[in-house]
Amino acid sequence: MKKLKYVIISILGLLASCNFTEELHLNEDGSGKLSIKFDGSEMMDMAGNEMAKENEEAIDSIISFKDFLEEHKDSIAQLPQEEQAKLKKLEPFNMHMVMNPDTKEMKFDLFSDFKDVNQVNDAFNAFHNASSIGNKTNTQQGPIQPAEQPTEVKYTFKKNKFSRTAKILDQELFQQQLDSMQGGEMFLSGSTYTLKYHFPRKIKSTSAKEATFSQDGKTLIFEVNFLDMMNDPTILDLEVELEK
């Protein structure tokens, strides 16, 4: 388990080299499942030999953040209420992690079922926070604390209309995030962030002009460059109207 938590922490360093897929399955009553997936196999192909030299074992595990937060409740209780609320947002999520130096496989999936899609707002930030708390294996390291995030993403689904909107909350922190990526633009340029949304009815229209659709018209796929998305989170804003 200790090694597993160490792996979570390493995710932050892998974000720049992975292709993300934000997959949403939405039911007629507004319930469904949201998943943030990324494939870091390309990164593993680069680092796998070194990990093999260090005798790193293959990992295929699922972490329940509800259980994780319960395990660390005493540490979390030391935090201000605002910070506790941020960690509380992790509770609905689980993370499936697969790392295998031999097969050069590295895949992560943060997922949650929901009764209303706004229950999983800020799923991407939840992914960051899941990474930032992974190194707190005991209270001697200090209280678990979520990473500060400069943006938020909100989802809504009312009647036959769905929306995804991003907003910058802290411009200074957002600029610091951009500055931290300087020098890695060439590497980042090969990464993508893809929305793959499955709706209960056929899509009538969408604001995402470059989106593509499944043959039955119920699935929308919208892919952007990861670096472009980090520079402008609103690039993935979209509205979808379903047929009645």
Image: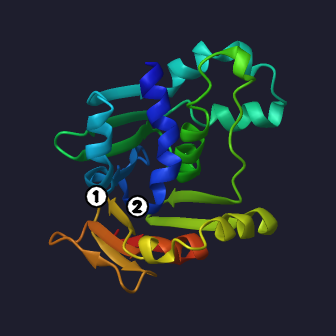
**How packed is label 2: few (under 14 Cα within 10 Å), some, or many (20 or more)?**
many
Q: Residue furthest right?
A: 80
Residue lying furthest front:
53
Residue at x 52%, y 45% (from the top left corner): 127
Q: Position of residue 242 (x, y in %)?
A: 37, 69
Mark 2 or 1, nearer chain start: 2
The residue at the point 45 percent across, 53 percent down is: 14
Which mark is drawn over residue 17? 2
Where's residue 225, x and y in %? 42, 76
Q: Residue 225 got which mark?
A: none
Q: How many marks?
A: 2
In the rendered image of this protein, does residue 9 appear above or below residue 34? above
Q: How many residues crowd around disc 1 within 10 Å: few (fewer than 14), some, or many (20 or more)? A: some
Q: Nearer the viewer, residue 88 or 213?
A: 88
Rendered image quadrant of residue 192 = bottom left
Can residue 237 be seen here? The reply is no
Q: Which residue is mark 1?
A: 42
Residue type at mark 1: give it. Answer: Glu
Can I make out residue 81 in this image?
A: yes
Label 2's element? helix
Image quadrant assignment for residue 152: bottom right
Q: Amino acid at mark 2?
A: Ser
- The percent position of residue 109, horizontal first and vertical second, equals 36, 43
In the image, residue 23 sits, relative to residue 226, either above or below, namely: above
The C terminus, quarter of image: bottom left
Quadrant (top left, top right, bottom left, bottom right) of the N terminus: top left
Secondary structure type for disc 1: helix
Q: Is residue 178 above or below residue 43?
A: below
Query: Residue 234's x, y, as percent?
Result: 58, 74
CB under 8 Å between discs 2 and 1: yes
